Image (cartoon, rainbow, N blue to C red):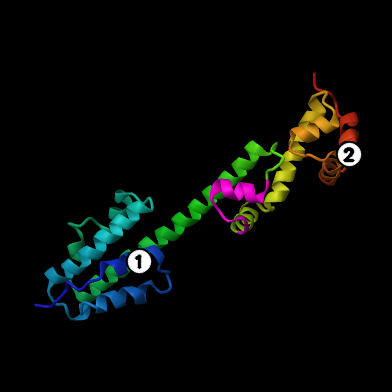
Amino acid sequence: MQDVKRLDIKKTEELLQSGSLENCGAMLDSVLDEVGFTEIQSLMLRLYVCMDIYVAAHAFAQKIGVSSEKFFECFGTADEIGAELMTTEDTRKFLHDLVRGCIKWRIESAKESGRSIIAKAKDYIDKNYMNDELSLLVVADAVGLSPSYLSTQFKKEYGQNLFEYLAVARISHARELLCCTSKMVYEVAYDVGFRDYRYFSQIFKKYTGQTPRQFQNSANICP
């Protein structure tokens, strides 16, 4: 009887966790070659090899948020996969499809997770724009990303860098306060996160075309 106990399931797990769509086929073939898979003629032995990889793939899929229902819909339950293993070539194709499908899910999950974290960064700014110490470093630390990665992904997601988004958020709130309250300009500047009144005036004019005082004088006072 052929020895199929040498299957290194850890290599399969590593393949699922870090393999790319470009190299996953060759990496899986390497794992299968270690057990002499091409020479396995017994359906029972093929099932033995396949089940180790199938179980690892199912566990990995659940770990990244893929439901068992979706997994079974794509690849069948453990009781159903026997029909896919009638020949060595059929089994190899099934395992390739299985591993490739899991890697695609992993890539999609990573993209969704990345977008979710960037959205959290945006939400953090919206809630803390009035903090005069708010910066790329502070936001990055709050969401657990490196400043450089956050900066790149934030601009990719929202079309403007984080500093620009923060400035626009502050100016938007400043416009509301200048229009609808009787606060002095320096008070508004402080309320929206600017320590320096002159710098606030420069940024305000940059985004509105008016100084804060000009805007306040021309605005209608809310009742």
Q: Looking at numbered disc 1 in the image, what kind of residue is underneath it?
A: Glu
The x, y position of residue 147, in whole percent, is 62, 55
Horizontal side of residue 78 vs 95, given as left or right: left
Q: Classify mark 2: helix, strand or loop.
A: loop
Horizontal side of residue 5 vs 223, given as left or right: left
> From mark 2 to mark 1, how far is it between C-alphas?
58 Å
Rate crowding at label 1 as few (under 14), some (14 to 19) or many (20 or more) other CA atoms within 10 Å: few
Tell me which segment is drawn in magenta.
Answer: 135-148
Rate crowding at label 2 as few (under 14), some (14 to 19) or many (20 or more) other CA atoms within 10 Å: some
Which corner quadrant of the image does residue 222 belong to? top right
Write down the residue under mark 2: 211
Which corner quadrant of the image does residue 35 belong to? bottom left
Q: Main secondary structure of the magenta part?
A: helix
Look at 20% across and 57% down and name the residue there: 78
Horizontal side of residue 212 vs 96, given as left or right: right
In the picture, the disc for residue 14 is 1
Residue 142 belongs to the span the image colors magenta = yes
Q: Is residue 78 above or below residue 182?
A: below
Which corner quadrant of the image does residue 15 belong to? bottom left
